[in-house]
Amino acid sequence: MPFVNIRITNEGATTEQKQRLIKGVTDLLADVLGKNPKTTFVIIDEVDTDNWGIGGESVTEIRKK
Amino acid sequence: MPFVNIRITNEGATTEQKQRLIKGVTDLLADVLGKNPKTTFVIIDEVDTDNWGIGGESVTEIRKK
Amino acid sequence: MPFVNIRITNEGATTEQKQRLIKGVTDLLADVLGKNPKTTFVIIDEVDTDNWGIGGESVTEIRKK
Amino acid sequence: MPFVNIRITNEGATTEQKQRLIKGVTDLLADVLGKNPKTTFVIIDEVDTDNWGIGGESVTEIRKK
Amino acid sequence: MPFVNIRITNEGATTEQKQRLIKGVTDLLADVLGKNPKTTFVIIDEVDTDNWGIGGESVTEIRKK
Amino acid sequence: MPFVNIRITNEGATTEQKQRLIKGVTDLLADVLGKNPKTTFVIIDEVDTDNWGIGGESVTEIRKK
């Protein structure tokens, strides 16, 4: 019964890409640890680039460079 | 001083329902563990059905079936 | 398919109390939002009092007063 | 490589204020623990006041008083 | 710069299995979204079975059946 | 009423260093956003280096190089 939270910046991931992430992570947990896909949860959070910082700067600032 | 994070799909929970969740969880922690409601935090995250997966599929796909 | 994360300080919650928290939160989500208990996850994190701060102080410091 | 998640109510934090939070937390981790800013992540979540509870009430309700 | 948090019960995942999870998730994000592995973080939390509930019961209780 | 979660590897942060993190983050939120320290929560999670990955490798592996 794993729970996976994937956080990415909201820069246009498509519905199809998100489905691939959900499927891929669920399969990985089944392959590596034998976890049952039926009770594997995946939540994707898409975060505004103003709200994500790395190296002391927001991703919005980094993208401008 | 508990902190509770409730994550649900964004499928129309009303303001009144959210208030009941907040009140209910806060009361539960006071009843079971004697935690002070004044310093009990509850955060509800409503997640898009495209961004929540179970069984390797998004909830959007599951709802179509 | 809700996911609930309860964070408390590690100050001796018993197995029985944790079961009551799990049961209570699961019932609450069924009562208020009609969520299926079978796909309701609850995770309890017990945090060392050195690692929890409120008002700018650790709970360890607060407990000494 | 620290990861910091700051959760605040969505009550008008400006882009400039968020940049100060990102910079401030990153500097703090470098100062106190010698952590490399380049691999310090900060994510700010802005939560609707209906979805944040304290003392058994939503912040929306508290703000009305 | 994705951040992934994988939560599993602490039932004996080996160091090698955890490495495969880290590698697998990082590769998945590179494949699906073109994310740079160098700034992909993965954190695995191993949760005591007393502290994880599903269906209103702790995993400890479920395992006994 | 901010909530801050700081995640670092468990590589020997002292009690005093954790207190400085708690104090520093709480002050930052008061300075930048005028948040009340009394209802500012900070939780520090110390994560095993086997359980933290970056660049597709665990920190344990990276530290060996």
Image: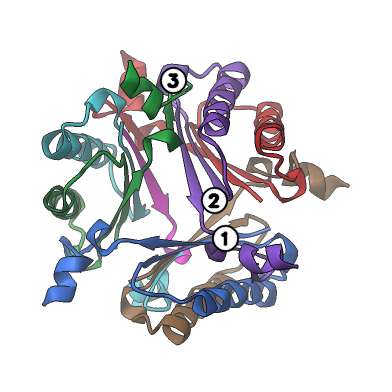
Chain colours: A green, B blue, C brown, D purple, E cyan, F red
What amino acid type should be assigned to the residue bearing mark 3? Answer: Gly
What amino acid type should be assigned to the residue bearing mark 2? Answer: Asn
**CA distance separating discs 1 and 2:** 7 Å
**Residue F54 drawn at (x, y percent):** 31, 28
Give the main secondary structure, helix, strand or loop, of the magenta stretch. strand
Quadrant of the image for the C terminus of chain B?
A: bottom left
Q: Are marks 1 and 2 on the same chain?
A: yes
Based on the picture, tell me whether residue E48 belongs to the magenta stretch: yes
**Residue F39 drawn at (x, y percent):** 72, 51
Reading the image, the residue beneath label 1 is D49
Query: How many residues crowd around disc 3 within 10 Å: few (fewer than 14), some, or many (20 or more)?
Result: some
**CA distance separating discs 1 and 3:** 30 Å
Q: Chain of mark 1?
A: D
Q: Which mark is residue D10?
A: 2
Reading the image, the residue beneath label 3 is A55
Confirm whether residue F48 shows in the render.
Answer: no
